[in-house]
Structures are given as structure tokens and as C-alpha cells.
Image (cartoon, rainbow, N blue to C red):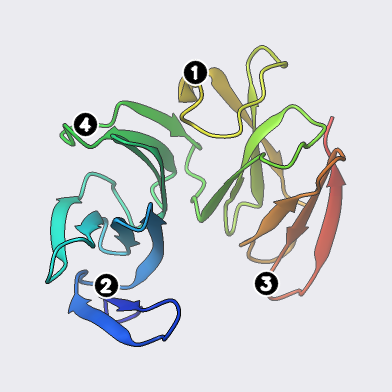
Amino acid sequence: MQTGEVILNDRETLKLISKQKSHQFEIWYVYLYQDNYLYSCSDDFSFKCFDLRDDPISQRYSCKKHDAGVTWITKEEEFQVMTGSYDGTIRIWDERNMKYEVASLNTEGKSVWDIKFNKKAHKSNVSFGVASIYDGYLFAEHQDQKSIYTGYSQDNFSLDQFSLKEYKGHESICYAFEFIPDSDLILTSSFYDSTLHLIQCQ
């Protein structure tokens, strides 16, 4: 929402449950975890966690450690969240101590808009991809060339063991991509030039 409001509606009736001003600027992404917690991230450099079990809904915490707008967030396990930002970093945080991130991957100045893990039996060495807006797409491969991770909560996952390969075949803003199941292909898209590319991974 451009107003910085978090709006909740009942998934069946669509009835308004809650509406509250939560961020100073635009909210780029929200993530619902186990129907109990809602995460939001914003152009105000922050991401927040809300407890949906409380009435009214309460804020558990707010973290403002990124150096630019936070564009993406997910949670796979009880105490850790993963975020991406315009500041060119992907970070993992321990919610029990938000003073510093527990791990970080630097994209060397390339903005992070969306992150997608390889969860579709993809026949490549890519564990996850990043839509990088004006810098094309980035695809992360583990340093041993064999390990494939479908999420950051897997055993032995470590951001500092990945290298990023670039795909810059589009001439416009890059927002979205998909792993094609049971293949080594990835479908990428771009905005103003309205194109789709099918690329093959090694």
C-alpha cells in the first residue's frame, strides 16, 4: 500500500478485519506465517512482524537495519526470517536478537526486488534466483556445484557459500521469473518491453 497501511481481510468473506498505519512509506511485500504472524516490509527501510492472535493485532517488533527500502521477506522456521533490499543485500535474521543479521549475501550494488527458491525439481545447480530490477536477474549456485537448496532453513545452508551469476538479456525492468519444473529452464520477464525469455541453466 502506498499509504503504509497494513490491511487484513477475512479470506472467505473478504470482510475487513484490521486496518492500521504501520509504515511511513510504501509497503512492498507482506508474508503470512502459519496464519499467526504477518510480516511487512517497506520503502522506509524497515520490516515488521505482527501477531494476528491478539485483538487488536499487535506489533511484535520492527527492524530498521537495511540501508534502503526492504522489498522482500519470508520465514521458514520458528526464529529466523530472510529479507532482501534495494541496498543490494540478502540477509538472515534471528528474531531473538535483531541487533545484527546472522548471515548476509552482497549482490555488489544490484537491487533485490524478489527472491525465489528452486522448489520445483529443477534440473540445474541454481538454488535460488533474484529479480534485480534494473540489473537483470541473479542466480545463486553453491560453491561445490552440487548442493541444491530449496530454502534457507535446510541443514548446512550458508549465504556466504553462494556465488551469483548474472542474466542481463532484458532491456527493461526485471520483476518476475519462474523455475520451469522438471527442466533446466527459467522463464524471465521484463516490464516496459513486455518480453518473456526462456533461458537454459548449466
Mark 1 / mark 3, whichever is N-terminal: 1
Q: Identify residue type, mark 1.
A: Asp
Measure the alpha-carbon separation of dots 1 and 3: 36 Å
x then y, percent, for residue 185? 85, 44
Q: Residue at x 43, y 76 (%)?
A: 11
In this view, the residue farthest toward the top is 144
Q: According to the image, label 2 marks what residue?
A: 25
Measure the alpha-carbon separation of dots 3 and 4: 35 Å
Q: Is residue 192 above or below residue 96?
A: below
x then y, percent, for residue 139? 66, 38
Circle number at residue 155: 1
**Which type of secondary structure does the marked residue at label 1 adopt?**
loop
Q: Nearer the viewer, residue 179 or 33?
A: 33
The answer to whether the residues at label 2 and label 1 have Cβ atoms under 8 Å apart is no
The answer to whether the residues at label 4 and label 2 have Cβ atoms under 8 Å apart is no
Q: Residue 95's quadrant in the figure?
A: top left
Q: Quadrant of the N terminus?
A: bottom left
**Which type of secondary structure does the marked residue at label 3 adopt?**
loop
Task: Using a 10 Å C-alpha cutoff, classify the residue at mark 3 as few (fewer than 14 neighbours), some (14 to 19) or many (20 or more).
Answer: some
Q: According to the image, label 4 marks what residue?
A: 100
Q: Residue 190's quadrant in the figure?
A: bottom right
Mark 3 / mark 4, whichever is N-terminal: 4
Is 24 on the left-hand or right-hand side of 82?
left
Task: Using a 10 Å C-alpha cutoff, classify the residue at mark 2 as few (fewer than 14 neighbours), some (14 to 19) or many (20 or more).
Answer: some
Is 55 on the left-hand or right-hand side of 184?
left
Circle number at residue 30: none
Mark 4 / mark 1, whichever is N-terminal: 4
Q: According to the image, label 3 marks what residue?
A: 191
